Image (cartoon, helix red, strand yellow):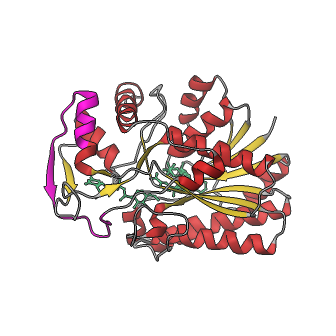
Amino acid sequence: MKKILVTGGTGYIGSHTVVELIDQGYEVVIVDNLSNSEERVLDGIEKITGIRPAFECFDLCNEAALENFFKKHADIRAIIHFAAYKSVGESVREPLKYYRNNLVSLMNLLKAMEKHNIRNMVFSSSCTVYGEPDELPVTESSPVKKPESPYGNTKRISEEIIEDFIKAVPEFHSIALRYFNPIGAHPSGLIGEHPIGEPENLVPYVTQTAIGVRQQLRVYGNDYNTPDGSAIRDYLHVVDLAKAHIVAIERMINVRQKKPYEVFNLGTGKGVSVFEIINTFEKVTGVNVNYVVTDRRPGDIEKIWADPAYANQELGWKAQSTLGEALLSAWKWEQYYRTHLEKD
Ligand code: NAD
Ligand code: WQD
């Protein structure tokens, strides 16, 4: 059985990817310091798959802990590196915290991979590296711009670190996946996104408002140059996103790649506005969302969506779920969390 290390595997996208890996017969070991997730996510994974993945709780910035880990797990075939801090707003307030965590953990990991001869890494990048694009849809060759936030900048710098590392270390392969906006949850409703404190992202804010945890959703601007005036993004179901990691791993392990470093956009190819999110959510759930239109959020871009053609052709990957399915799964998870997990 092929063993895969999933860093950040108790987090939102990581946990969904772990489920898909287990379903595909991989052996998974998770490393996470639980800075933005909880150990009981493992219970959800176990309920869904029937298997409890191995879990080691430590900080990837701790080189000694990482070294001990690899001594125990010498047979890892590939790494999916999700672990990072991801709050855009917090990164503006505490940039050094973000540069340190996101870059030191990556460099420690690359160093350990070289030492232990582990050659394959999938890296979680983000559409944030495109900034406000000049042309839509965004392809992998669209210009990378200096992102607005220190968080976004850690993704741009991380990609450059990996690219430089690969030039120096032959045989190393990496695929950087630039996610657009992941939303939703596993259809079982047993795992999902649970932001600590007030959510920054739209869909958790919608579900928390719908369930009554938040009083009112703020729609950040209705004066954008878009059909309904609200900003446009490319929202993809987290399970579709998780599946892309399996094909990326298989490409690295099984296919002799043409290039040692590859970048793929992962999105649906469709732009969706904030009002369309609210309307679709209300339609599929039958629950109204109390909202108010406010000023634009500083740093927000107007519109972005992916051209996923390269991922379609090269990885054979395509986002399958509809927006309604994704929003319904987010709602199912919100309800499960509030009735079963919150009170524990
Ligand atoms: P998440 O916060 O839910 O998961 C990240 C996990 O990494 C958390 O469980 C956290 O505890 C862990 N972690 C953070 N720093 C660590 C460290 N130093 N050592 C060990 N564990 C550590 O985030 P997510 O939404 O699942 O995102 C996963 C990855 O995808 C991140 O790299 C993120 O930047 C990237 N990404 C996310 C989105 C999104 O909208 N969610 C979009 C684009 C890219
Ligand atoms: C989506 C839309 C908001 C909240 C962020 C990061 C990006 C990437 C994905 C990691 C925007 C609007 C939001 C609310 C709202 N993450 N909105 N009211 O801004 O596209 O991207 O997450 O890499 O780097 O910047 O996602 O979910 O915050 O916002 O009106 O309460 O919803 O203005 O138009 P965003 P988001």
Query: In this rendering, would 290 be left or right of 147?
Result: left
Q: Quadrant of the C terminus?
A: top left
Q: Residue at x 31, y 66 (%)?
A: 300
Q: Looking at the image, which residue is at 50% across and 74% down?
A: 143
Residue 226 point in image, percent of width and height = 23, 60
Looking at the image, in which quadrant does ligand 2 appear?
A: bottom left
> Which residue is at the front of the view, 24 or 67?
24
Q: Quadrant of residue 328?
A: top left
Residue 105 higher or lower than 147, as above or below: above
In the image, is residue 128 part of the stretch drawn in magenta? Answer: no
Q: Count numbered badges in the picture.
A: 0
- Does residue 266 appear in the picture of this structure? yes
Which quadrant of the figure contains the N terminus? top right
Residue 178, image quadrant: bottom right
**Which quarter of the figure has residue 48?**
top right
- In the image, residue 239 sits, relative to residue 128, either above or below, namely above
**What percent of the width, then of the height, locates residue 208?**
28, 39
Identify the residue shown where x is 58% and y is 48%: 312
Judge whether residue 57 can be spotted in this image: no
Decide if residue 5 is on the left or right side of residue 94. right
Asked if residue 299 is among those painted magenta in the image, a careful observer would answer yes
Task: Report the side of 211 relative to 155 (left or right).
Answer: left
Residue 201 point in image, percent of width and height? 35, 52
Taking the spot 49% from the left edge, 37% from the top edge, the residue there is 320
Residue 126 lies, in percent from the top left, at 50, 60
Q: Nearer the viewer, residue 304 or 73?
A: 304
Residue range corresponding to the magenta coloring? 278-302
Nearest the viewer among 302 and 82 is: 302
